[in-house]
Image (cartoon, rainbow, N blue to C red):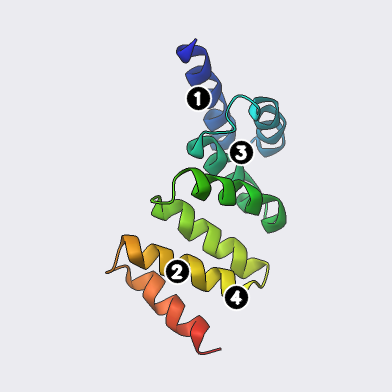
């Protein structure tokens, strides 16, 4: 059964890499109940919406991914960008702070944090 699940995620990744975003969303939505506790799945689904420049749809996926694994800096970076796109400055600041807790020398997060705090 594990291999079936792995195949499904591989198919989702393939659709994304081929630029078949609408099909990827439809397929991904059909998998959501099976992968509701999988941060990688949540990251992929949020990523599709980022590519499509739909921050509002991306946010719940990144929030769930961070809830499941709050140590993934890549997810936190994308979540920060989504908050910025939605003009949610305080939440973007919180994400920067989380990144810096995990990677104190992350100069990108540090620079953005300073910029946001000075606005």
Kindly report which numbered mark, 2 or 1, lies closer to the viewer in this rendering: 2
Comparing 66 with 31, the one in front is: 66
Give the spatial CA distance, label 2 vs label 1: 30 Å
Whether residue 57 sits left or right of residue 74 in the image: it is right
Q: Which residue is drawn at 52% across and 81% down?
A: 116
Give the answer, above or below, for where 41 lies relative to 96.
Answer: above
Whether residue 117 sits left or right of residue 51 in the image: it is left
Kindly report which numbered mark, 4 or 1, lies closer to the viewer in this rendering: 4
Q: Mark 4 or 3 closer to N-term?
A: 3
Kindly report which numbered mark, 2 or 3, lies closer to the viewer in this rendering: 2
Give the spatial CA distance, label 4 vs label 1: 35 Å
Q: Mark 2 or 1 closer to N-term?
A: 1
Q: Name the residue under label 1.
A: 10
Label 4 packing within 10 angstroms: few (<14), some (14-19), many (20+): some
Are circles 4 and 1 on residues that touch, CB within 8 Å?
no
Q: Mark 4 or 2 closer to N-term?
A: 4
Q: Which residue is drawn at 46% across and 14% down?
A: 2
Residue 84: percent from left, percent from top: 60, 69
Kindly report which numbered mark, 4 or 3, lies closer to the viewer in this rendering: 4
Q: Mark 4 or 1 closer to N-term?
A: 1
Give the spatial CA distance, label 4 vs label 2: 11 Å
Q: Mark 3 points at which residue?
A: 19
Please state, as top left, top right, bottom left or bottom right, where the C terminus lies in the image: bottom right
Are circles 4 and 2 on residues that touch, CB within 8 Å?
no
Judged from the image, the secondary structure of the residue bearing numbered disc 1 is: helix
Are circles 4 and 3 on residues that touch, CB within 8 Å?
no
Residue 86: percent from left, percent from top: 68, 67
Q: Which residue is drawn at 37% across and 75% down?
A: 110
Judged from the image, the secondary structure of the residue bearing numbered disc 2 is: helix
Comparing 17 with 74, the one in front is: 74
């Amino acid at each position: 059964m594990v291999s079936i699940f792995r195949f499904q995620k591989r198919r989702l990744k393939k659709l994304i890499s081929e630029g078949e975003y609408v099909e990827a969303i439809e397929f991904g939505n059909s998998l959501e109940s099976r992968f509701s506790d999988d941060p990688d799945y949540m990251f992929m689904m949020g990523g599709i919406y980022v590519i499509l420049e739909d921050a509002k749809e991306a946010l719940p996926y990144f929030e769930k991914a961070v809830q499941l694994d709050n140590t993934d800096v890549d997810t936190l970076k994308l979540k920060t960008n989504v908050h910025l796109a939605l003009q949610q400055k305080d939440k973007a600041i919180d994400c920067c702070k989380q990144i810096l807790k995990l990677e104190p020398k992350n100069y990108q997060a540090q620079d953005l944090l300073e910029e946001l705090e000075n606005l």
